[in-house]
Image (cartoon, grey):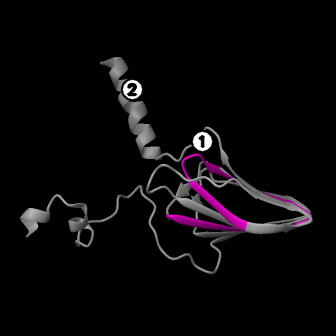
Amino acid sequence: LDVFVRDLPAAHAGRPGVAPAPHRPVAGPVPADPDENVVAVFSSAVRRGRWRAGRRIHAYAVFGSVEIDLSEALFEHQQVVIKAFSVFGSVEVRVPENVSLRGAGGGVLGSFEVDAVDSAEVDAPVVHVDGWAVLGSVEARPKRGKLVTDLLDRVHRKVENSLRKHL
């Protein structure tokens, strides 16, 4: 039967030896404990640049501000959960345009705003933002002009372009 089902996508789903592409985020259960805590008490905390986003991130802002910028982060997991709690403070989450963004939460005399976005890519990472804002704000939005890219692909393109100039 292998001859007849060789070109069907479901035929290769359960086969041993077929591994997911290394640059794709992997799916799996989200742990209850956070991989990282970002805390700001009467201060500010910023997490941005090139970093590896864990499956669960907790952000706490008490009379302070927390900024989590995922626009240059490496997504090793299919789902990233951000629990955001703000008391008299603010939590801002920024994601690239080609990442799905979902949220659930609320505000008590504060604001909880998540601009939900679904990515056109099937294997795009999904960022879930939930939590509470008490006399503060939690905001999650896509960062325009930023896309999740593979650094290795970017280097290959630059090398190819420079080689074309010299050939």
Report x, y in % for residue 100. 57, 55
Left or right? Give the position of 8 relative to 120. left
- CA gap, disc 2 and disc 1: 22 Å
Query: In terms of image quadrants, where is residue 86?
Result: bottom right
Q: In the rendered view, tell whether residue 128 sits above or below residue 100.
A: below
Q: Which range is magenta?
A: 78-104
**Residue 100 lies in the magenta-colored region:** yes
Q: Which type of secondary structure does the marked residue at label 2 adopt?
A: helix
CB-based contact (under 8 Å), mark 2 and mark 1: no
**Residue 112 lies in the magenta-colored region:** no
Label 2: few (<14), some or many (≥20) within 10 Å?
Answer: few
Report the disc number at residue 137: none
Q: Evaluate whether residue 59 shows in this view.
A: no
Question: What residue is pinned by disc 2?
Answer: 161
Q: Tell me the mark number nearer the camera, choosing from 2 and 1.
A: 1
Amino acid of disc 2: Asn
Report the disc number at residue 146: 1
Report x, y in % for residue 69. 68, 52
Amino acid of disc 1: Lys
Depth check: 114 or 145 in front? 114
The residue positioned 55% from the left and 60% from the top of the image is 126
The residue positioned 27% from the left and 68% from the top of the image is 13
The residue positioned 20% from the left and 61% from the top of the image is 8
Report x, y in % for residue 145. 61, 38
Left or right? Give the position of 147 relative to 132. left
Q: Which type of secondary structure does the marked residue at label 1 adopt?
A: loop
Left or right? Give the position of 128 relative to 75. right
